[in-house]
Image (cartoon, coloured by chain):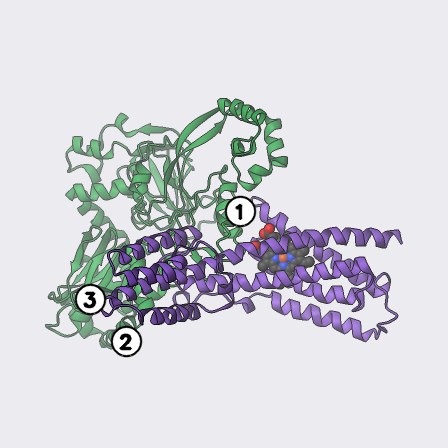
Chain colours: A green, B purple
Amino acid sequence: MPGVNLKLKTLSGLSSIYLFADENQADLAAALGDCEVSEYQPEEMICREGEYDENCHVILSGMVRVGLPRGSGGRGSRIILSDGEVFGEIAAMSGAPRTADIIAMKPSIILNISRSSMFSLLDKFGSIKKKMDALYRERALRSQLMKIPMFSGVSESFVDGLVDRVQMGSYAKGDVIFNEGDDADAFYLIRYGFVKVSQNEDGKEKALAYLKEGHCFGEMALLNEGEKRMATISAINRVEVIKIAVEDFSNLLSSYPGIRRNLESAAGQREDRNVQISQDANLANTLRTTIEDGVISTKSLLIMDTTKCVQCDTCVEACAALHNGKSRLVRIGAKINSFIFIPTSCRNCEDPTCMAQCPTGAITRDSNGEIYHKDFCIGCGGCAGNCPFGNITISELDEDTDKGIIKRIYALMFDRGSEKGESQYKDLGRGPGGSMAKGREADAVMRKRKKKRKAVKCDMCRGFSYMGCVYNCPTGAARRVDPTEFFSDLTSVG
Amino acid sequence: MDNLEKSDYNLLKSVWPILFIVIVCALLAVRYSMKIDESSSSPGAGMGLVYGILSLALIVILSGYRIRKSLLRTPIGSLHAWAQSHVYMGVILIVLVFLHSGFRTGGMLSGLLLALFLLVIASGIIGAILYKVVPLSLSKYGRHVMTMEVIGARIEKLLAEADKQAENRSAIFQETYSKHIRPSLASQQVNWGYIFIEEDEVIKTCKAKMESLQQDTPADEVYGMSLVGAIYAEKERLAYKWAMLNSLRVWLYFHVPLTMAMLVALSFHLLGSFYY
Ligand code: HEM
């Protein structure tokens, strides 16, 4: 837990930090204005391995160690970082969980740059982008390259040589990385984000596959000299790539003929797959909608199987029951294919636009990767406006000012309405058929309550051991899935 | 490609059917290994009583499903597991109740109880079939989830579209339309007959009707009539879905009240058993 939270504005001396040294300090202060600064005491945990934390951290002063927590027997190696050094940038960028514990060694002041702020820093400030790329090259590139299945068997010295020569590239959502028919300029590895592979068919775009972090593309046209690009590759969300130049790739093929053979057989599989997509309308449709509806770039998706859903709405009732009588789930939505549809419910996007401009920082991702609103949400509606799927609404919530313990225990034990998720107003006779006495009682309760505007969205039933909608679906139609696993058949072959 | 090409709806995936078969076989084996003479066995003694107590326990659990359905905040097992258990326990119950009664109907009260019980079971089986068939038939339809609201709104739109098509047509066209097609388009009534037939049959009937109507249509308006026919077929397709969806709601109006009536009869049956 951080100690004291200070506002960045109260700190000066950003110019002494290597990462920020070459930029205009006023512009930087403006760009970093919303970032938080935290103070940690020695042995305090800053990041925990396996947890989600969307921040990239810069040590303003102090010292931290990356590695095993104290007392774990000294296994493995530790890295010590101090003033001006950066950590957590890779997990922040990829949205993946932390790969190591990070613990303060001395009293430390840490600048926490949120993922969205980090991306805007990279886009705005050339020197910061350069330095971050250099950091990536130093810390992660080698292991990333070694992870590519195609590189298994390639000597370490060859990979080391590549590390110095590869280029980095960034693309915004919708940008075309290359077009079908273009000359082949490089081989690409996706460092972060999702891309769409498509071809032109009678003037219309036909999606063939999507590719994600760790996948490669662009090798087909490099196999035979002079061949053009066979498909268009475009960014589904923000994409960062590593580019290996034609000469290096040719070198690789001539040094390791096995790689060429594998790529050629993968090319054959891709051909078969393209034929399958042309013939199978359901598959083609699923592919198109998962890409167009932004399904792929989400972390967790509530799906409903229409071949099982009996439209009893118990899921909606359950959602209301778990959320003070207000359901966050609307059981309508687009069908992805002939049997799956996506109801209105948070998708925990990889790159959550809802979190981008929250003025109070109330919308956040927890250590499990779930996005939720903290209690101090002011209901301004920014997140709701930014959610591309319309999954956040602004609602007037009742705030019961009568916090009597007896009343609460009574409500827990006997208030069937609260168990079933019915509004207490309805119970008190506000609805049709209520008696006048009950109506007056309801008014008295209403006066005691303050109305509060708040953003309301699916919070994956935080605080409960189960997800209300899934747990209470009588037919098993409602399921939460990881889209990249569930739709893994839509990724490219080879 | 499993995830994308078919739903994973597979009852045999669950352990229940196997457990069910094992339990039924075990019960029958016990029954016949004891070689009890049917005429001398009594529901109130020996194994008869054991079956009676087991049946009562199952009926309590089966009725408890309603309570589970309203306890949405209480983690006492997923509703899906409860629903599956409900169906299989219900079927096991048939065997248990007959073993308890010694395959006889008994006196008036017992007879009434048995009749109500069989009605509950029959309505339950119908419900289980509807739960399987209706969503499958609704899912075959286009890009949208077919809810009551969606269907209702579409039907209204179709009527307006058909009226527009019929505007400024010849008198014969107008008459055919208002006499033979519009009443069906405007009808809000649920056609219960639809739940017993396939959707394709509904469409075939529509087409046959339109073909016969087109014979009297002036040649230059045949195309217009075919457009109206397409709207009519669409409406009947939606009416089919409407009937299907309604059946999901309506069957519970049988299953639940019959359950209530059975529980009342059962209370008297139990009181009677204790009294005598
Ligand atoms: C004595 C036997 C039974 C009793 C007391 C009983 C009772 C009930 C009750 C109280 C409900 C809750 C209805 C509601 O949602 O309000 C229900 C639902 C249901 N029952 Fe039964 N039932 C029995 C046997 C069966 C059998 C044999 C089957 C099928 C083979 C069956 C299938 C169903 C189904 C499919 C539901 C609806 C599930 C849902 O909507 O979640 N029942 N039953």
How many residues crowd mark 3 within 10 Å: few (<14), some (14–19), many (20+)?
some
Looking at the picture, tell me which residue is in the foreground, A67 or A273: A273
Residue that appears at 38% across and 38% down: A104
Chain letter of the residue carrying label 3: A
Ligand 1 lies in which image quarter?
bottom right
Kindly check if marks 1 and 3 are in contact, taking CB atoms under 8 A apart as contact.
Answer: no
Label disc, if present, on residue A141 of the rendered structure = none
Looking at the picture, tell me which residue is in the foreground, A38 or A224: A224
Chain letter of the residue carrying label 2: A
Say yes or no: labels 1 and 2 on the same chain: yes
SS class, disc 3: strand
SS class, disc 2: helix
Query: Which amino acid does the dot numbered 1 rest on?
Result: Ser
Kindly check if marks 1 and 2 are in contact, taking CB atoms under 8 A apart as contact.
Answer: no
Up the image or down, A325 lies above or below B139; here it is above
Image location of residue B88, percent across then percent down: 63, 63
Quadrant location of residue B39? bottom right
Q: Quadrant of the N terminus of chain A?
A: top left
Asked if residue A16 lies left or right of residue A411, the reply is left
Asked if residue A187 lies left or right of residue A485, the reply is left
Residue pointed to by mark 3 = A199
**Label 1, label 2: how many angstroms apart (C-alpha)?**
44 Å
**Label 1, label 3: how many angstroms apart (C-alpha)?**
45 Å
SS class, disc 1: loop
Residue pointed to by mark 2 = A272
| Label 1 lies in ligand 1 vicinity (Cβ under 8 Å) | no
Residue pointed to by mark 1 = A465
